[in-house]
Image (cartoon, rainbow, N blue to C red):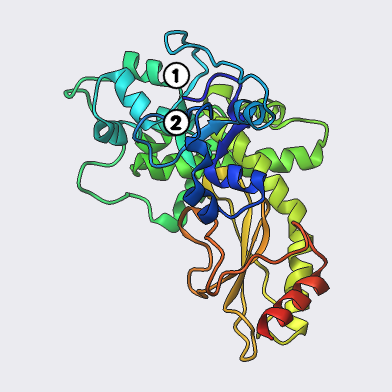
Amino acid sequence: MIRAGRQHLVRTLADLAAQQGVGIDHYTRLKPYQAPGFPAPISSEGSRTRLYDGEQVDAYLQGKPVPPLPQPEVEDDSDLLDRRECAALLGVSPRSWDVYKRDPALTAARIEAGGVEHWPRHAVKAYQADRPGDAAPKPGRPKSTGDQVPRDQVAARVAELLDADPAISAATVTARLGVHRNTGQDALTRLRAGRIADHIAAHPTLTPAEAAAHLGYPAAQTRRATARAEVLLRARQAAPYLADVAAALHRAGWTTEQAAPDVHLPGDDRVVAALVLDGDQAPVPALVWDERYGWRTASSRRHPITKGAVPPSEGGSVRYLAGGITPPPGDVVTALTTTDA
């Protein structure tokens, strides 16, 4: 459980390894997190991904008393719960929660922290209070049928609905268009995020939440959209730099066309971009840029970005290039030339 107001302190094992200046493989072999006194994970027991509270870890590493977190019986509606904790709150199995979480309200409330899905306690409680019985009519497309709107037309149709009613909910989109609730929710989130980012570009003093309010978007429905808007703005800021690197790689003869990088926003919380090097003399199949770690080589042209954009371990054809997050384009070329040598 991530306690209320502490999401920014969440750290993964990869973060802890980087903090100690070692690779994740070396760190997990040494297992310093199993030493006596090391803070316990804040992720639920049995979770695949261990998450830690950064303030507690920093105190431990500095030899200071580890500050306690609130006791389990002290609940805050803004606590963030993972899938096991959500299931426990509802009294169901985690597999049942995997079905329930597709509800538009829960999809809208979902927050990713440390690469793990979480939901605010208040959203789970609201779902529990409002959950219809099995006999209640289900909105959206009929069961076992496809979306009633072709996928390439969904964004335009949702845009029309959003223009007509800025406060429209994902459930209404699902019912009006006859599409899967995830399809409607994703399209609505992306549209709102793009418009929030555009509004901030025109009014730079606004925060994403303020921009959403200006556009008439209800705060309870736009958490994912405002989070994505923040990342989208960072992606736009990085675009000129990424284009300069792409141009430098093309001048080096490693790409057949000076194509723009393929930018992704995995989990709506970070910017990752891929550049495929399809030239005959290219030293590596592809390059990946991550706003947290900088450049690395990739072993696949077809799938340069790993599933979930999880940073792969260094080794084989994967190498992290030195020079920080945004080294000059010429330095990227030099680093690859060195790799080729």
- Whole-percent x and y of residue 156? 52, 50
Quadrant housing residue 43: top left
Disc number for residue 280: none
Residue toward you, 163 or 26: 26
Image point (45%, 16%), residue name: 122
- Whole-percent x and y of residue 62? 69, 30
**Label 1's element?**
helix
Calculate the distance from the C-alpha at mark 1 to the C-alpha at mark 2: 15 Å
If the image is split into quadrants, where does the C terminus sit? bottom right
Disc number for residue 121: 1
Image height of 161 relative to 291, above or below: above
- The kind of residue on which mark 2 rests is Ser
Q: Give the left or right position of residue 63, taking residue 24 as reference.
A: right
Earlier in the chain: of badge 1 and badge 2, it is 2
Image height of 276 relative to 135, above or below: below
Residue toward you, 290 or 104: 290
The residue wearing badge 2 is: 43
Image point (60%, 25%), residue name: 56
State the residue lying farthest toward the left.
135
Mark 1 nearby-residue class (10 Å; few <14, some 14–19, many ≥20): many
- Whole-percent x and y of residue 262? 61, 65
- The kind of residue on which mark 1 rests is Arg
Mark 1, mark 2: which one is toward the viewer? 2
| Residue 159 appearing in the image | no
**Label 2's element?**
loop
Image point (21%, 23%), residue name: 136
Mark 2 nearby-residue class (10 Å; few <14, some 14–19, many ≥20): many
Image point (40%, 32%), residue name: 104
Image height of 169 relative to 295, above or below: above
